[in-house]
Structure formats: structure tokens, C-alpha cells
Amino acid sequence: KNEVEQSPQNLTAQEGEFITINCSYSVGISALHWLQQHPGGGIVSLFMLSSGKKKHGRLIATINIQEKHSSLHITASHPRDSAVYICAAPLYNTDKLIFGTGTRLQVFP
Amino acid sequence: SAVISQKPSRDICQRGTSLTIQCQVDSQVTMMFWYRQQPGQSLTLIATANQGSEATYESGFVIDKFPISRPNLTFSTLTVSNMSPEDSSIYLCSVRESVYEQYFGPGTRLTVT
């Protein structure tokens, strides 16, 4: 069992739909990262959060420390949101990031 | 936030040769990391690059295959030595400014033929 698990693995949506990607982890963490990887390979850090909720534009990330669960929401999805979304958690008191396997999102016009 | 650049952005190399990937950061950072992402897989940490000391390698990665240099607080190189097709991957440089702030470079897409 992976220490960081994401669901779904693949997701397709029509433009304008509300998207939710889930991340569950089984390790003690100090913070959780949501990353976006475009087809070229480069990774952009979307959010880093240790509690509660953060919002940036159409993106919202939430985390529930007690339940060891985080979600990434995309409102009014757009084809340019098509990418792989990865959650990653640094193990508590270590430098090591544990990555989820990613969710491949395709948004069609 | 730190801005990271990598060179080259992509390369196609012959089996048995070596490639050196450069990572440049626009600010001084203590912790730099090198990751590999094999096709269809998640990211795997290769090593932590420490300024002024030898890199710390993760299990399964050795210095002879992936030598790393870290001459100062803004620059690092990763060499992929004696390449085989199994080394075809995206290689990413990453820096950490705090536990809440980790940034990734644009990646180097390597294909070994």
C-alpha cells in the first residue's frame, strides 16, 4: 500500500465542470503539497498547506489532518487545466517527499 | 518564490554516454534535490545535494551512476553516467526554502537510444 494515495487515477470532464481530486496519506506529515505537471514535464507547485483550506483563483485545496485526507477542487474547469495533478507529503522530521501516483485530468471543450 | 531553470530541457543520447544536467536557482537555498520520473511513474528522489559536502543518495542510487556537484548555494549538476535505455526519464531539480515551500524546475526530458 502506498503511503500517499490519490483518486481517481484518470479523470475526464467537460469544460465548466467542477473537479475534485482526492489524496489520502498514512504517514505523519508536516504539510501537504499539490503539484501540477504539464505534458512537457515541468512541475508547478500549486499549494502547500498544513491545515484548513487555501484558494487561488479557481483552485481550492483542503486538508483534514485528523482524517489524513486532502482534496483539490477546480471550479469552472477549462481545457488548459488538463494536466497531471500530484499530491506530495514530506515525512515528519525528514527531508523526503512522498509522492502520490498522480491524477491525469483531461478537460474537453 | 524561488525560480529554477534547468539545462538542457531535453536531450536524446546514445547508450553508454553521459549527460550532465544543470540546475540554476535565482536565490540562495540550502536544500536542493534531484528527482527522477520514469515513464508513467511518480517522482523518485535520487539524492539531496548539499553545498560543501557530498550528496546524500537514496536507496537504489549510487554516486558512480549519478554524480552530483553543488559548488554553491544557487547551482547544482546531476550527471547520468554510462546511460542505458532504462535511464530514459524526466529529471527534475527541486529546492526547499522551508517545509512549506518547495519548488520544482521545468525538468530535463532524457531519451536514451
Image (spheres, rainbow, N blue to C red):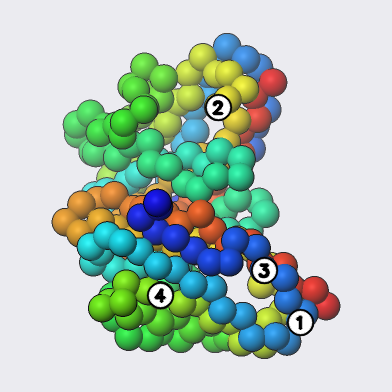
Residue B24 spot, x, y in % from top left: 43, 45
Alpha carbon separation for disc pair 3 and 1: 13 Å
Q: Which residue is mark 4?
A: A70
Q: Which residue is mark 1?
A: A15
- Identify the subunit bearing mark 4: A
**Along the line of sight, the residue nearer the viewer: B39 or A36:** B39
Q: Residue at x 58, y 66 (%)?
A: A8
- Identify the subunit bearing mark 3: A
- Identify the subunit bearing mark 2: B
Both labels 3 and 1 in a single chain: yes
- Amino acid type at image mark 1: Glu
- Amino acid type at image mark 3: Leu
Tag 4 secondary structure: strand
Q: Residue at x 66, y 51 (%)?
A: A40
Q: Taking the image as drawn, is residue A62 in sight?
A: yes
User: Upstream in the sequence, badge 4 or badge 3?
Assistant: 3
Q: Which residue is mark 3?
A: A11
For the view shown, which residue lies furthest in the right direction?
A109
Q: Taking the image as drawn, is residue B71 in sight?
A: no
The label nearer to you, 2 versus 4, is 4
Is A79 located above or below residue A35 in the figure? below
Q: Is residue B42 left or right of residue B56?
A: right
User: Upstream in the sequence, badge 1 or badge 4?
Assistant: 1
Alpha carbon separation for disc pair 3 and 2: 29 Å
Tag 3 secondary structure: strand
- Amino acid type at image mark 2: Asp
Q: Which residue is mark 2?
A: B87
